Image (tube, rainbow, N blue to C red):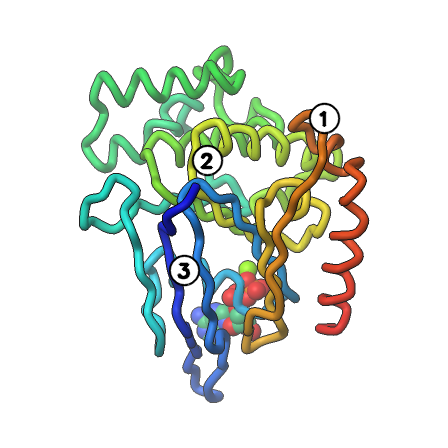
Amino acid sequence: MNSSILQLHNITYSYHSLTGEIPALSDISFSVKQGEFLAIVGPSGCGKSTLLSIIARLLQPEAGTILFQNPNGSLEYPRTGYMLQHDHLLEWRTIFRNVMLGLEIAHQETPENTAYAEKLLADYELYKFKDKHPSELSGGMRQRAALIRTLVMNPDILLLDEPFSALDYQTRLSVSGDIGHIIRSTGKTAILITHDLSEAISLADRIIILSQRPAVVKKELSIHLSKTDNSPLAARSAPEFHHYFNLLWKELSHEK
Ligand code: ADP
Ligand code: MG
């Protein structure tokens, strides 16, 4: 985990509407290392989703530059995969056909890719549900299926925009733990947006705190927890946890 996969330099972005200009991001700079798990927290409406759209190259920054370094050394942009609050699984397709959707659209349903999709389903305990439809699965299983659908495209960077917010608290705890584990074990770089401070501390290597809109980077916090295992509960009961929580809480309560 040494070279950076992504560097943002002085990114600024405003929306333009009939009623005027809405400045969303102001002079945002930070970098993300290969294999790092970064969380971004900030008040609602401060520009977090806008920032992810810029990283995904769906929006062009108004000012500033964004540098990508492909982890395999090639000059191509690293591939980004998106995961959102709603799983957007298609009800009329089975779980397997949902997981294969991106590959099908990209005409990449090769035997290797199909085997990889099956392996991910097996590794993450969804294989026996592969012929079921989304409505037959729990919210947590659906979110795991949505992650697998993203992973089969083999992205270099995973962009997670509040992916657990639609889940109830109990499910959210276990699914965020599962998903954190899947991302770590596949060695992916991840950028997670969340408004749940405990979730950010328990999953991330580093947290970036954004201010009110237009967002600036208020603080960066590296997270080091002495934990016994990788479960979300172990992270939450680590001795350092409350220290980080208080720091984040203090920073964000100035932003209300
Ligand atoms: P967050 O994800 O932090 O809640 P967003 O990045 O979605 O915030 O939005 C930042 C600000 O930009 C908000 O005030 C929002 O209302 C505004 N905004 C977002 N999308 C658009 C758009 N397409 N047109 C105009 N304003 C927008
Ligand atoms: Mg958002």
Q: Nearer the viewer, residue 205 or 202?
A: 205
Which residue is located at x 44 percent, y 53 percent? 32
Q: Residue 121: image x %, image y %? A: 45, 19
Quadrant of the rendering where the C terminus is positioned: bottom right
Task: Tell which residue pokes out farthest to the bottom in this image.
Answer: 20
Q: Nearer the viewer, residue 132 or 2?
A: 2
* Badge 2 element: loop
* Badge 3 element: helix
Any atom of ligand 2 within 8 Å of the CB at mark 2?
no
Left-right relation of 108 to 93: left
Q: Are marks 3 and 2 in contact (CB under 8 Å)?
A: no
Q: Nearer the viewer, residue 229 or 124?
A: 229
Mark 1 belongs to which amino acid?
Thr
Which residue position holds label 2? Answer: 89
| Mark 3, other Cα within 10 Å: few <14 / some 14–19 / many ≥20 | some
Any atom of ligand 2 within 8 Å of the CB at mark 1?
no
Which residue position holds label 1? Answer: 228
Please identify, in this view, whether the residue under mark 3 or under mark 1 is nearer the observer: 1
Which residue is located at x 63 percent, y 64 percent? 42
Left-right relation of 215 to 147: right
Q: Residue 132: image x %, image y %? A: 48, 18
